[in-house]
């Protein structure tokens, strides 16, 4: 007789495996939103999921595999959010598109945090298959956004929108890390007037760069 | 009688301390250029300098302190290189400035590598004093580049050039990590045609974004 509660038992049927994987991802997501991706360990994720570390490793390769899967998921969610925000309109401007891109990415704080970690650490601690699955998901989301963005506003074609989305994602990734300093550094920023220029206000700074980029792309498209 | 060779002895006089620190930084620089910042340990740096780890820690706080000092140094070198490239001209265009910014930053592969590491890891493992010294040096280089860039081409004022330089630095930092994948990932890119869109050609991609940004800033400045 098995006395373990059902959620702690080893998942043997495919649908149980899916559920277990989903609960691991959910634990990793909520921990990262609490304390930042960098600070979350595999032990934390296992504890939050209610199973032990070696059990977690039956469903994923590494801690980094978990976060790479979440990065892929977040890219799809960003694409869906953008599509919803743009709606059925076909009379938008590149400037409006830039604003919506920034608004929707900032709504995904986990994606913003993960974007810098993906090439720097996540992709380096998983198998080639895991990287491939992640890259294909991210590229599909990018294609989706390029299509939706080109339909929303006629001046920029899909190639130009792809460049805009990709630049916004790179800037969001690097600005997020600068705009979310550790506590000691945040205190330093607050106390040191000479660092006023180093403080980054995430959404305004990102939006300003995206709108400038969109204006430049529009000029180039003429 | 002291039998240690002079360079292994403890540096007691201020000028000796300076020399010792310079040789530690030089070792860290050449190791990072060889195998990438991420892979260099304090033990590597000590071995290359020819002293032991605890001796290194008399001159710097941590491994990250060494690389933060090098980041500051690289920012100044970038500013100097840009000034030299722009020369005495005052009839340049924003587009030419964008091209020179990218050309001069790509000439500093160590800076490109360090840019992503600075907020993500380096700033988090040093004292507030070390962060402050680094930030002030980087801001001074940014000011210097804003001045030189504004003088070189009249359309953009210092504030706009500052935005351009800062955006180029953010993009250079994130593109560098993507454009310098680990060996296994580089193999995957080469073998998998579906990833053709994920391959980044560093200088052309950076230059295209910088020129688009410069065009947008020029439009805004009118």
Image (tube, coloured by chain):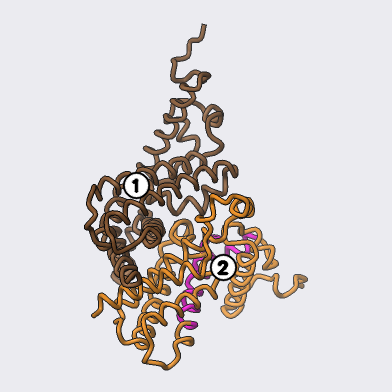
Chain colours: A brown, B orange
Q: Position of residue B125 (x, y in %)?
A: 48, 57
Which is nearer the eye, B160 or B24?
B160
User: In this image, A120 relative to B2: left or right?
Assistant: left
Q: Position of residue A154 (x, y in %)?
A: 28, 60
Residue located beneath label 2 in the image: B59
Q: Which residue lies at the image location 25% right of the left edge and 50% below the top edge?
A: A86
Vertical arrangement, residue B156 with respect to residue A178, above or below: below
Which is nearer the eye, A100 or A25?
A100
Q: Which residue lies at the image location 47% right of the left edge and 51% below the top edge?
A: A117
Q: Which residue lies at the image location 29% right of the left edge and 64% below the top edge?
A: A155
Q: Can the viewer see residue A195?
A: no
Magenta highlight: main SS = helix
Q: Position of residue A6 (x, y in %)?
A: 44, 16
Which stretch did the figure color magenta?
B53-81
Q: Quadrant of the C terminus of chain A?
A: bottom left
Vertical arrangement, residue A61 with respect to residue B203, above or below: above
Dot 2 lies on which element?
loop
């Amino acid at each position: 007789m098995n006395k373990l509660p059902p959620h702690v038992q080893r998942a043997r049927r495919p649908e149980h495996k899916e559920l277990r994987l989903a609960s691991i991802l959910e634990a990793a997501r909520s921990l990262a939103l609490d304390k930042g991706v960098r600070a979350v360990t595999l032990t934390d994720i296992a504890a939050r999921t209610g199973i032990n570390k070696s059990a977690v490793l039956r469903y994923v390769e590494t801690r980094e595999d978990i976060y790479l899967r979440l990065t892929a998921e977040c890219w799809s969610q960003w694409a869906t959010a953008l599509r919803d925000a743009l709606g059925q309109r076909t009379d938008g401007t590149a400037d409006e598109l830039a604003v919506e891109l920034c608004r929707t990415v900032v709504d995904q704080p986990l994606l913003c945090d993960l974007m810098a970690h993906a090439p720097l650490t996540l992709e380096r601690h998983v198998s080639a298959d895991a990287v491939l699955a992640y890259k294909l998901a991210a590229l599909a989301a990018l294609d989706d956004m390029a299509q939706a963005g080109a339909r929303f506003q006629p001046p920029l074609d899909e190639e130009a929108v792809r460049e805009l989305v990709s630049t916004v994602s790179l800037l969001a990734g690097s600005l997020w890390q600068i705009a979310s300093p550790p506590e000691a550094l945040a205190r330093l920023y607050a106390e040191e007037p000479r660092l006023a220029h180093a403080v980054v206000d995430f959404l305004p700074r990102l939006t300003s760069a995206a709108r400038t980029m969109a204006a430049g792309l529009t000029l180039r498209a003429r």
